[in-house]
Image (tube, rainbow, N blue to C red):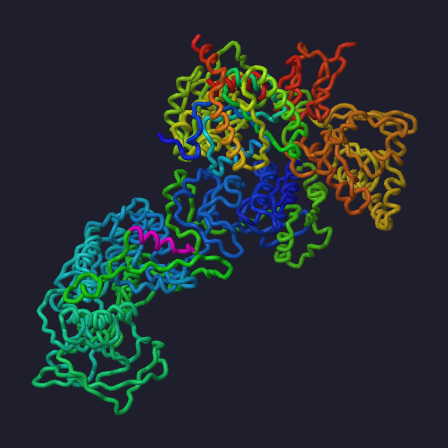
Amino acid sequence: MSRGALVIGSDIQGVQTALDLADCGIKVTLIEQSPCLQANNAKSPGESRLGNHIESLRLMPKLLKAANHPNINILTNASVEKVRGTKGDFQVTVVQQPRYINAGICTSCGRCELECPVNVIPLAGGTPDRHKAIHRPDHGLKSIPSTYIIEKRGVPPCTAACPAGINVQGYISLISKGKFAEALDLITEAVAFPRVLGRVCTHPCEEACTRCKVDQAVSICTLKRFVADNSSPRSSLRRTQASGNALEPTSRPRVAIIGAGPAGLTTARDLARLGHRSTVFEALPIPGGMISVGMPRFRLPREVRQADIEDIIRLGIEIRTSTPIGKELTLDDLKRQGYEAIVIAVGTHRNQRLGIPGEGLAGVINSITFLQAFNLKQPITVGHKVVVIGGGYSAIDSARTAIRLHCERVLILYRRSLEEMPANPEEVVEAQEEGVDFKYLVAPIRIIGQEGKVVGVECIRMGLGEPDRSGRRRPIPIEGSDFFVEADTVVVAVGQRPDLSFLRGDTTLTEGGKHIIVNPLTMATKVPGIFAAGDAARPSAPLINAIADGRRTAVSIDRFLRGEDLQERRSLDKVVPIEVNLDEVDVPLIERQPIPCLLHEYRVGNFEEVCLGFTAEVAVKEAKRCLSCAGCGECLECELACELEAIEHDAIPKQIEIEVGAIAIGGNPDIQQNVQMWDTEGMDLADRRSGIYLIQASPEAPLSPASAVASKIMVDLAKCPQSEKEHYRVIEETNETDVLPQICNGAKGQRALSSSEPRVGIFVCACGGSISEVIDVPSVVEYCRELDSTILSEQVGYACTDETAEEIKDLARQHDITHIVLAACSCCNLGQICFSCSDRRLQCKSNLVDSNQQDNICYEFVNIREHCAWVHNSRPEAATAKAKSLIRAGLARAKESQPLAKRKHNVERSVLVVGGGLSGMQAATDLAVQGFQTILIGHDERSGENRFAYHSLSEQFRSARHHLKGELTRSGATVLNGTNLINVDGTAGRYQVSVTQNGKSRRFAVGAIVIDMSSGLDGRENSSVAPDAELPSLLVKAFRSGKNRQMVGQPVLETVVSRLPGVFLCGTGQGAVDVAEALVQGSAAASKASVLLSKGTIDIKQTLVTVDHQRCRGCATCESVCQFGAIMLTEKIPGVYRAEVDEGLCQGCGICVARCPSGALSQSGYSDSQLIASLEAILA
Amino acid sequence: MTKPKEYQDIDFETRIVGFVCNWDAYSGVEMAGVNRKEYPTNVKLVKVMCLGRLHLGLILKAFELGADGVILLGCPPEDCHYESGTAMAKELFTQTKKVLNLLGIDQNRLALVEVPLGRGDLLAKQVSTFVRRVGRIGSSPLQSSVEAARLA
């Protein structure tokens, strides 16, 4: 059996229900689907954003109260999944989506937002504003909880497309902010060879780019090249740690890697980062494999690839070049030398043969030998008429190399069409620009030679048939179409395969000698300890795949060396990218920045790099084209910015089980609709007895349905057998006459200020930089140290954290401080909550002030953030000076202050209900069931009938009355028939009521009074008040007219709350004629009365007006100006009248203070002397 | 240091006091901060629960202490939290202007502005306008006597 309640939806109704319940001591869990409380969900589409925003501000105080209520636990970003159980005993499963930020730590200083490079594009159905990926939802600074949230939509298509898993969106967004080194960090976090990849990567990311749906892909590859060429990685310590291990290679290499190509070197590098040293054996005289020998310099300059390789060697990796494995050094030798793991990454350095006659002729060269000769500066003879056979990258590279040698003609023969060509179309275009001829759908049948030398190629034309396994259409020779092409050099570039001769025919690792067979997930071969990576382990694939292989291999070897399972928590499943629907999004078209290239006339005859890369300006411009479609790109800049380490990028959804006795569902129609989706195991939610209540909000009386639901829940929980006594936790027990000096606005309760000089401590908050970036905080601190009475002046980082509060209090204790002036963002030390308040400020105050009972320190808050730093951004010096004078004024105010007591007095646990119409009966029933002593007067057979009788609903009225009568009898309420109300005296919690019953007068004390207006109290017909008697004078104040019956800080009309504290109204307005409304109002009034009675205490405004009776002349000016009837003359001794303030009625405006001609009135916190002290300080 | 363009015609030597109502007007001050709406630094604000709390004496005190201008920042009458506060402030405004005239202080040194809830932009604009206005009027005639008193 649970005693708590669950409220779903933080619309104003939901919040009101939660507040009523919580004030009664019931533990409430408030669930909100969005990331922050949303009071204002009546967002009509026509309403302007400003209007919405202001409406939200109006509701702010209520939300803040709920957010800081000790009995309310708020779960934002959460939704109900499952509801089981019955009334009084529900088990609710709630799933809370992560914010990726620890709400308990974040102070909303906003540093992360400034650093975040991502401006999120608004997607259909999401928030309409463009904002940073890390942001405060909805009301900006005013969101509750005032914690940041990271918008993560999933994995962006570019990152998902990258075989090596480079965080593409992350580095692009960093480039867009000009953070080039950071971008490079992010790239090298995933892969080595950034410079090489930036030039020759086949960039599957660009094909996947969301921008393709708008115009063209972001130029990702060239942007990578830009940062790789133009910045050096910061080798940030944090990122290395994040990857698991610091770089501490073991003393002896444990891993042998065969082949210093991209796969082998990536394995070696990742192993080094994981803490394992390795030796790399390379057959060729230079490391790099195909990167070094298979790519022409005009695509990949020598110094570029060398720089990348040197970056890897610098990690402590030994590369033994010209050390082939096979004849002199075998695999077994390596094992014998103590290498525990061996990686075969030999690549594909053996050419496929054409398999046609004449391949052995002089002048026929394979592309590997051809390209390698140029890279290793080996001698090679190339004729004048070159034919290149093939359509891959090496074919194009060979042709482009040949054309640079002043060959007469270079011709590429490809047996399929351009469409099927594996080479990048851009490369084809460049080759054509340089003068390479292409013949498509042509295959060689024979190479013709004379005297052992090539003279030409006999070819045949091809047609295209059905697609083959690779998806490309199969070429079919056309009979009789053969022709002759003249050539003195033929370069064969029809594919490569690994040279596995070093295995000496050992077939345990291979399949027919073609490739080494590995588990594609772990890259492990059948032989434990032997791994293979790169093209040697699978059909040829682009460079980036080799790098991806290397990364996987390194992880496997790390696990192998640690004796862990190789497969656990790994999968080859493709990462599913987010679906981005741009249909309703207006994305401005921006042309892709062209990649500058060397002009054609400068290319021929030399091997200068053709593509030139971006300039910084162009790079930033191009990077800005990125739509950041996934929201957060996980560049982790926010982690670096956050000094409090509040950011949790790895957070996952939380499932929370809640046990409650009752459930209320807020007034938002969307939320109410969601209820249909709950898994309720067949429970009927529509059943009125189910214990689940939908709040039916109406625009006329927005809050009474909420309070009525609260009352129903109170009744439900009171009826729960095991919770009868306990479920009301009285928040504070005090004696009736106790006066608790609580927060003092200056002087302290016990210590007399006059006798001892105040000892002031001044603390200045830097707000993590958001204040100190404008105001020179150290100089302010220094200045404050010199001020009179200042014992201590210190800077604090974040005043609103628990730690800082403890620090401040510790310092105050050490230095025997009596007054603390805190210059931060809080603006007052009062317990009230205004429109301008924020969640953080309340936390700051509660950390410092509320837990301050024993310390007896007085606080004064000075806002130097919103009122100084943030509005004087461009004038830091003047802002610093202003901050000093504001603090001076705070100090002056503190010293001038008088004790401010927050008084409480006890409340009778009994209630009087006047008028027994439907509302009155309902209220009396609800209250009596909860165990409050309830007296109902003015109830008779015809109560309220006269109004309903004329109404078409009279039948409904009668049946409702009949039902309520039964309930009322069972509830235990005392019904006094034939009773008239004579007089009411006292104040809320302690009303003295006089009634006459059958001529006898009776008096009793009640805590609250509920008046059912429908029974005619105001209209005087069928009145429960004696017809001849005046309405008790005190009650008149409850109905006091005014254009604005709203109470201070209660911006939404609460129809049941009267102006007189402790007096509640029902049966008003529609409630006087409408049965359903009458019942709602009755319950709502009961809820309000329950709150008062359960709480047991009444708080008195801290800005209360006080009277100096020595000075009061009894002129009654104050009485005439008070709109609330809170101040009036009383006869102190016969004939002598003095003003007296009713603590319950006084709203603390201070208008009477301004009007008092004799200066007898004063207002706590805002006395004349305090205001003048402020003026003196700021004008000094 | 060069003055930002929008303040170039403002005399930064002037000293301006603003009395702010705790409710709508103060939320304007708050939102001006939140939305980084700049206004001149020589305006210093004193918060009261309601403009109705002010009396002639307090405003004159500000002038006596050397203020070159006093701006009263209140709420629209229909939004007054205490119903009559804005009306009271209007009355006080009229009365104070007359007294200022008598004392030989330009009555344009006093302004009353209504700031609706949450309108930081409006507050910053109104305050800037007032500072410019006072800047054009120049230093308060009481300034010299204040200086003298300070030196004495």
Residue toward you, A220 or A437: A437
Apparent side of residue A894 relative to residue A697 in the rendered image (left or right):
left
Image position of A245 with respect to A395: above or below: above
Image mark count: 0
Residue at (57%, 32%) from the top-left corner?
B25
Which of the 4 quarters of the picture holds residue A1087? top right
Q: Which residues are magenta?
A: A616-628
Residue toward you, A103 or A794: A794
Residue at (39%, 56%) from the top-left corner?
A626
Q: Is residue A619 magenta?
A: yes
At which x and y percent is residue A634?
39, 51
Image position of A454 with respect to A883: above or below: below
Apparent side of residue A26 relative to residue A265 in the rendered image (left or right):
right
Which of the 4 quarters of the picture holds residue A63? top right
Q: Does the rendering let one see residue A750?
A: yes
Q: Main secondary structure of the magenta part?
A: helix
Residue toward you, A282 or A300: A300
Q: Which residue is most to the left? A: A451
Residue at (11%, 76%) from the top-left corner?
A383
At which x and y percent is residue A183?
32, 50
At which x and y percent is residue A135?
46, 45
Which of the 4 quarters of the picture holds residue A744? top right
Q: Is residue B1 magenta?
A: no
Q: Which residue is most to the bottom? A: A480
**Quarter of the image containing the N terminus of chain A?**
top right
Apparent side of residue A423 relative to residue A920 in the rendered image (left or right):
left
